[in-house]
Image (cartoon, rainbow, N blue to C red):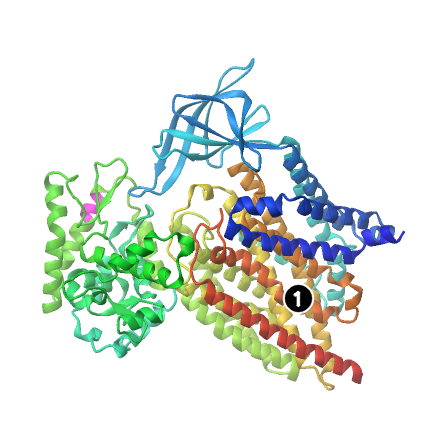
């Protein structure tokens, strides 16, 4: 009997799930250091790890079968939790029965076998059908080497069946005799294809059944009066009327909603002197500078960037200046002015320090005491590159053996080469070749022999003429001739750009997007309005501010205007890039901030503290997005992301992130209120703390539902794209860790040792748990690598210190809150 009670114990559930999450986290770092094969052998597919998962399934089943627990749990919650048993069972069937492998076929050849993945190696296995590759096609983004899509024309023959002709591409699957074929890769010479092959019909059916039950349990739990969510809703409704359907209303609207640092600020202070000028005797006012009005016309031209995207020169030069200088403006000059200055006056601007270097040792080596060096600093008196030998040594080292100084030197070398290519006119692809079927664009410094006749004369002479007229413009302040040349270049581009054609409406929209810089103003508004609203909300809770409600109404109206401006920015970026704007870290940060502020405004009438907290965090998120660690450049989608799954999977995950962010904010605010408890305000503050704790738990339930649904939608997408719904990629694994972490926080009420401390502990953990989401969202890109690291980012050490400091401050706040609660309890 005691053994049965132990097996069905919530405490055992807590121990097993906590150990599971910890081992998953360790496995991701082991994989990063030693490779996927080691992580699979010693963790994911190891007998002890499979046993750990089996024990969790047994524990969950035993809890369901236990009479008292079965009676307490609602039907929706029972279905939701039971769905995981189907998912575990499906995973077991897939692991032990499923077959995966690859087929490599050259054009004109036939294959009837695959290399089967046996974990420790590959083994050749026959298939009940043959596949002939008639043709393989790779389409690249115009003028670049980046693949846009690739597909294979196949003829599939099975016994006693007619040949099947089919085309397979990324995100399009072919089913043959229970086997599923996926476009995986291709040969470097583009004459062969690599197909992924999987056979997992029983496991997939069980797993998909689990996913369906998750959805049913989710919906049932939301509307059931007997569920935990329903009980919380009733209790909160009793504390204040008209609350019960508030969160459901937000849920519906959230579902519908799924369907730069300081550039503007720098414009307003364009006449102020930058730190560079102060640290170096050569100041910008002493250098030749192109007119801002003419530079604006230059910025309206179009270039084909290295990713194969047509964009305004203004967007292109902004990305270059951010790379070199770390901001969108330099001393009040915009990026177009900077680029033209460097292009026209290389000697003068080559002596000015604008190349950002983060390593103090390198700065001292070049005799600089600020953050920047000049391009000329890296050359000796004879014009020799002084870093040449050092760079050759670094490039010869294996990547794992390179030290921090080596990495900083590589970044500096890249910046030096960018400046050199600008000076050589090799980094400005302005001229489309109308006769090139791939839509290649050329820079003035490239080999222009592909152009013939008048086109050749134009592209070889126009840039020298233009630079000459730029010099005249600087000396005479007359820009008419330079403006005429810009117009001539524009006419040439419009006439010759055929693959792809220039969409002038999108070019104008992008120029407007760059000029308005809406997210900067939204960030400013969110921080200011959110801070004032927080002050008023605290005053209403603690000191009964009588004038607070009217002033809050005005501020919330202003916050709504800022939110609508934010919405316009998101929609404008969506129109420009042609896909849902959450395909990289910058876009997801901007959109999550938008969802967060929107959710706070939805709760404004019921909880005026929430728009304050949401506004503050939304402003902080936009501030982080504006830092140079995240690249705001609009980029084309890699082939695997060109899917309708991108919108649903990412949007639902982001809604989960928003709820978890609200949980962290509410938990943090509750800890602050606990520290403010006193004999005079005890009753009122405890009422508010309980009210916000209920809201916190309800938001966490919703966040967990959305996070789980989004993660498993991603698994379905992976099955469609790669032939497997779970591959222990670090991003997938950390999403699972986040689900486990929040599940543990939600079930903390079952721990007997925490009796009487549940609210305090729950609010503390709701703040700490957000670290798992941050790791899933950004940490994987900073510290780990995998299939989801489409835009791996630098700057992880800086963020690690911020996270560590934040956690320490939260724990200090929580300890003082606990001490205050004990004192109040002892007194009353």
Q: Is residue 659 visible?
A: yes
Label 1, residues with CA under 10 Å away: few <14, some 14-19, many ≥20: many
Q: Residue furthest right?
A: 1
Q: Is residue 248 visible?
A: no
Q: Quick check: is 597 in the magenta stretch?
A: no
User: Is 653 left or right of 477, judged from the image as shown?
Assistant: right
Q: Residue at x 30, y 71 (%)?
A: 363
The image position of residue 612, as x and y in percent, is 56, 72
Q: Quick check: is 493 in the magenta stretch?
A: yes
On-image quarter of the C terminus: bottom right
Q: Residue furthest top?
A: 160
Give the residue pinned by disc 1.
Answer: 765
User: Is 505 left or right of 496, judged from the image as shown?
Assistant: right
Question: Which region of the structure is painted magenta?
Answer: 491-495
Q: Residue furthest bottom?
A: 680
The image position of residue 9, as x and y in percent, is 81, 55
- Which of the two residues, 732 or 696, is positioned nearer the viewer here? 732
User: Is 464 left or right of 654, judged from the image as shown?
Assistant: left
Q: Determine whether the residue tagged by mark 1 lies in a helix, strand or loop.
A: helix
Total numbered labels placed on residues in the image: 1
- Which of the two residues, 828 or 557, is positioned nearer the viewer here? 828
Helix, strand or loop: magenta stretch: helix
The image position of residue 589, as x and y in percent, is 48, 59
- Which of the two residues, 366 or 452, is positioned nearer the viewer here? 366
Task: Relative to 307, say whether 270 is above or below.
Answer: below
The image position of residue 50, as x and y in percent, is 68, 44
Q: Residue at x 51, y 62 (%)?
A: 593
Q: Quadrant of residue 820?
A: bottom right
């Amino acid at each position: 009997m005691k053994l049965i009670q132990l097996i069905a114990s919530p405490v055992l559930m807590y121990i097993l799930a906590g150990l599971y999450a910890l081992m998953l986290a360790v496995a991701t770092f082991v994989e990063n250091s030693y490779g996927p094969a080691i992580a699979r052998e010693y963790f994911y597919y190891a007998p002890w790890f499979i046993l750990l998962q089996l024990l969790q399934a047994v524990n969950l089943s035993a809890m369901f079968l236990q009479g008292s627990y079965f009676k307490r749990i609602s039907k929706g919650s029972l279905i939701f939790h039971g769905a995981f048993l189907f998912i575990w069972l499906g995973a077991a069937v897939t692991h032990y029965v499923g077959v995966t492998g690859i087929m490599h076929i050259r054009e004109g050849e036939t294959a009837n076998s695959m290399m089967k993945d046996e974990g420790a190696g590959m083994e050749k296995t026959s298939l009940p059908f043959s596949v002939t590759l008639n043709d393989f096609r790779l389409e690249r983004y115009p003028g670049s080497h980046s693949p846009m899509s690739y597909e294979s024309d196949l003829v599939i023959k099975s016994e006693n069946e007619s040949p099947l002709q089919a085309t397979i591409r990324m995100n399009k699957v072919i089913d043959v005799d229970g086997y599923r074929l996926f476009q995986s890769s291709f040969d470097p010479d583009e004459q062969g294809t690599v197909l992924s092959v999987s056979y997992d019909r029983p496991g997939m059916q069980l797993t998909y059944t689990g996913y369906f039950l998750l959805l049913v349990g989710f919906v049932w739990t939301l509307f059931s009066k007997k569920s935990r969510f329903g009980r919380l809703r009733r209790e909160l409704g009793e504390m204040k009327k008209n609350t019960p359907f508030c969160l459901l209303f937000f849920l519906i609207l959230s579902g519908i909603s799924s369907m730069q640092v300081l550039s503007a600020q720098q414009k307003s202070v364009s006449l102020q002197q930058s730190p560079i000028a102060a640290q170096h005797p050569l100041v910008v006012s002493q250098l030749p500078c192109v007119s801002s009005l003419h530079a604006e016309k230059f910025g309206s031209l179009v270039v084909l960037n290295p990713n194969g995207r047509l964009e305004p020169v203004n967007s292109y030069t902004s990305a270059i200046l951010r790379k070199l200088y770390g901001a969108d403006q330099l001393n009040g000059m915009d990026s177009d002015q900077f680029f033209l200055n460097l292009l026209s006056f290389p000697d003068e601007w080559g002596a000015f320090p604008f190349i950002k270097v983060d390593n103090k040792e390198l700065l001292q080596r070049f005799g600089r005491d600020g953050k920047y060096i000049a391009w000329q600093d890296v050359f000796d008196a004879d014009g020799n590159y002084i870093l040449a030998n050092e760079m050759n040594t670094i490039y010869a080292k294996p990547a794992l053996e390179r030290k921090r100084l080596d990495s900083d030197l590589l970044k500096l070398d890249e910046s030096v080469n960018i400046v050199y290519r600008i000076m050589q006119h090799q980094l400005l692809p302005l001229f489309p070749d109308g006769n090139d079927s791939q839509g290649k664009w050329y820079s003035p410094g490239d080999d222009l022999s592909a152009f013939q006749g008048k086109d050749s004369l134009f592209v070889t002479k126009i840039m020298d003429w233009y630079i000459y007229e730029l010099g005249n413009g600087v000396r005479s302040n007359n820009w008419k001739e330079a403006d005429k040349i810009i117009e001539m270049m524009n006419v040439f581009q419009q006439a010759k750009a055929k693959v792809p054609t220039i969409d002038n409406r999108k070019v104008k929209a992008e120029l407007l997007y760059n000029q308005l810089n809406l997210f900067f103003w939204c960030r400013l508004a969110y921080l200011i309005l959110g801070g004032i609203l927080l002050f008023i909300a605290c005053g209403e809770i603690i000191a009964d501010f009588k004038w607070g409600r009217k002033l809050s109404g005005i501020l919330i109206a202003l916050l709504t205007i800022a939110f609508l401006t934010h919405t316009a920015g998101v929609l404008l970026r969506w129109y420009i890039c042609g896909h849902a704007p959450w395909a990289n870290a910058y876009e997801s940060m901007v959109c999550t901030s938008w969802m967060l502020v929107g959710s706070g405004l939805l709760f404004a009438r019921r909880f005026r503290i929430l728009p304050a907290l949401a506004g503050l965090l939304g402003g902080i998120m936009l501030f982080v997005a504006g830092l140079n660690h995240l690249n705001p450049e609009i980029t084309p989608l890699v082939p695997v992301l060109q899917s309708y799954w991108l919108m649903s999977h990412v949007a639902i995950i982001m809604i989960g992130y928003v709820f978890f962010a609200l949980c962290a904010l509410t938990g943090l605010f509750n800890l602050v209120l606990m520290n403010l408890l006193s004999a005079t305000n005890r009753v009122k503050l405890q009422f508010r703390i309980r009210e916000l704790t209920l809201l916190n738990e309800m938001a966490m339930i919703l966040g967990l539902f959305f996070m789980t649904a989004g993660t498993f939608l991603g698994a379905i997408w992976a099955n469609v794209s790669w032939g497997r719904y779970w591959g222990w990629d670090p991003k997938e694994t950390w999403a699972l860790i986040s689900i486990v972490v929040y599940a543990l926080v939600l079930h903390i009420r079952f721990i007997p040792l925490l009796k009487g401390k549940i609210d305090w502990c729950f609010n503390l953990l709701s703040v700490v748990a957000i670290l798992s989401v941050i790791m899933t969202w950004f940490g994987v890109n900073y510290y780990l690598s995998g299939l989801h690291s489409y835009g791996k980012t630098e700057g992880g050490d800086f963020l690690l210190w911020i996270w560590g400091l934040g956690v320490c401050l939260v724990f200090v706040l929580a300890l003082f809150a606990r001490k205050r609660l004990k004192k109040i309890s002892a007194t009353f």
